[in-house]
Image: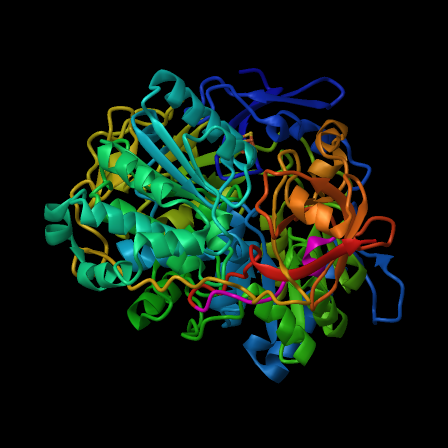
Amino acid sequence: MTTDVYKTTCCYCGVGCGVIVRKDKQGALTAEGDPDHPVNRGQLCSKGMNLHHTVNDRSDRLLYPQMRYNKQSPMQRVSWDAALERTAAVFRTFIDKYGPDSVAIYASGQCLTEEYYTLNKLMKGFIGSNNIDTNSRLCMSSAVVAYKMALGEDSVPGCYEDVDTADCIYVDGANPAWCHPILWRRVEAAKAANPDLVLIVADPRRTDTATTADIHLQLRPGTDIALNNAIARVLIENGDIDIDFIHDHTEGFETYRARVFQRTVAEAAAICGVSVEDIRRTARSIAASKGFITMWTMGLNQSVAGVHKNLSLISLNLITGHIGKPGSGPFSLTGQPNAMGGREVGGLATLLAAHRDLKNPAHRLEVQTYWGSGPISATPGLTAPEMFAALESGRLKAVWIIGTNPLVSLPDVRAAERGLSKARFVVVQEVSRKPETLAYADVVLPAAAWAEKEGTMTNSERRISRLHKVTDAPGEALADWEIICRLATAMGFPGFSYKSPSEIYDEHAGLTKGTNIDVSGVNYALLGSGGTVQWPLPAAGASAASPAGPGGPSTAALTPRGAAFGPAGTPRLFTDRHFYTPSGRARFHDLPDDARGETTDGDYPFILTTGRIRDQWHTMSKTGKVRKLNQHIPRSFVEMHPDDARRLGVAEDDLICVSSRRGEVVVRARVTDSIRRGVLFLPMHWGKILQSDLNRANNVTKNVVDPLSGEPDFKYCAVAAEKY
Ligand code: SF4
């Protein structure tokens, strides 16, 4: 490989595609798919193909640290030392005066594992508070809790390879054709190779994913549990369940069964707004399959009953014994590129490093001893929405926001604005000048972007890959890990004098030793250039591993508890049917089926659901810079059914005001029969445009969360709609 060709990883979604980046003599980058990468085999979706534009165009970049001395003063350029010393001093003052829980960090699923690790070490170990949360709270936290409740560990049992051999795939609450496109191409290829593969999609909208389905269950929003319980009832009634597996390897089945049998299939069908026959067809397809995969993402996670929705789907794998074998398993698709890596290092206010349990005193002691830190608090920290409420109430004094844009992405976003406007001290660590949070910042720390720093990420199938530094960051921007470590040192904490992200990774890997996610055998040398491995990979196996190649090292000899590895080195978990619960059994749960985030009424009769479009990512600070991506859908819109449009006198492209008890959005109408009557859809991406925030979907969403996961419900709020 010449010095101007680099193998790295796409920084958008959890599929984790390999990218080859070339740098020409002028320093301009181009990106293409890595043909040797086991995930994407040379393919990239529209976002990945245009990654280089986000780095080549530096017109929006933050170049220098800035700060203001009080809220009335203007922002001014300062040195790194001045910015970090002031931040350290203010944080120290608040901690000394009000205690460690008076400060917080709000970071991102875009952060690399090394960044996540150092942030958690700083906050949980040295500051002594668990007030560190990330935007993964809005994304995957329901799946984290559900996996733990069902399987005893936050572990995705399967891998992408399973798609190739499944003969029934049930996607509930996801649109991977748009949001995980390269994985969906693998599903389409599997279907082309095996026309008997049955695709089932549950979604209130006829998305591109649903269009390819053999069965589209166009359910009412919020009724997934009723649907999945009804499918389970049919499977149980017909004897199409794996009695031996249930008896030998699970617990709680009778409670689950009793709940499932509380509704007839006809009752459930009426609740869901789907036909009895489609429920029965779905059950027959699952029953006939030798390999059955369930897939889901935000449609289930982002719900007031997100954990129970997850469990209702995972339970279908458990009653049929379709877990821990090729072609089968419950597979949560991570939205963000490193949501899994973040979870590995304990990157939420409710987690501890290396999948240890925050509530367990022995686990806390292990981690604090390893770090040489002070005591780790047993009290879970503030979740993302709670942080902004605590800023508003004054309970929280200072927040350090890293690589995320809460003033577009949080539910009931005007409440988050109120929180930031009341905050005593706001630090924003960012790549771009665009995020709305910058208007509230007291200190701005310019960060390096993708391809300007190195580190690792873990994708949805537990695959760890490296990201390489290809080019220098502009101006004085620094890699996030370096900013974090310099700030920790400025606060007077030892243990942050790393010379490279590789050193940080080694420390993280050492902390996983002996756990279910043991990656003590992984290091930068093993990952090499373009190499990837899936966890677990304990140190003993790494010594037997061949050099990291396209598919990663051979791990055939490794069999940690519950894991087995296929010939290509692909680990599946629970192949020995031993789960990570205390009893070793997977757990069923009682799953009541009401999952409405808010009640509709005469004033607010529509159900609003929000989501992504194909060519934009989150709040558009990267994809919004790329002309080609903006061409796909150039402006925000609201989808509504033709019957609803007719009733409201609305025609295509009319301006529509969507309002709720929280606020208003004014966008153009898209009239389409692909959405259910009575349901509206708004894309999540747009924020302020020319000082107007009327495109911002979260003006109207409600800050109501799942009580088990703290994840907000973005899929069910009551709104009104009228011509503007
Ligand atoms: Fe990147 Fe995801 Fe597209 Fe792959 S599928 S290129 S990881 S955005």
Q: Is residue 12 left or right of residue 463?
A: right
Q: Is residue 512 visible?
A: no
Q: Is residue 536 left or right of residue 634?
A: left
Residue drawn at x 40%, y 17% as measured from the top left:
192
Q: Examine the rendered structure and indicate whether residue 230 appears above or below residue 534.
A: below
Residue drawn at x 41%, y 24% as measured from the top left:
38
Residue 165 at what x, y percent from top left? 29, 26
Residue drawn at x 61%, y 72% as measured from the top left:
103
- Residue furthest bottom as drawn: 97
Q: Which residues are magenta?
A: 695-707
Quick one: 598 or 139, which is closer to the camera?
598
Q: Is residue 95 left or right of residue 289?
A: right
Q: Is residue 188 left or right of residue 103?
A: left
Where does ligand 1 appear, by image quarter?
Answer: top right
Quick one: 421 or 503, which is closer to the camera?
421
Asked whether 700 falls inside the magenta stretch, the response is yes
Q: Examine the rendered structure and indicate whether residue 125 appears above or below residue 588.
A: below
Quick one: 97 or 265, which is closer to the camera?
265
Asked whether 524 falls inside the magenta stretch, the response is no
Majority SS type along the magenta span: loop
Residue drawn at x 55%, y 57% as measured from the top left:
134
Residue 280 at what x, y percent from top left? 30, 41
Residue 654 at what x, y percent from top left? 81, 44
Where, by quadrant of the figure, is residue 167 drawn? top left
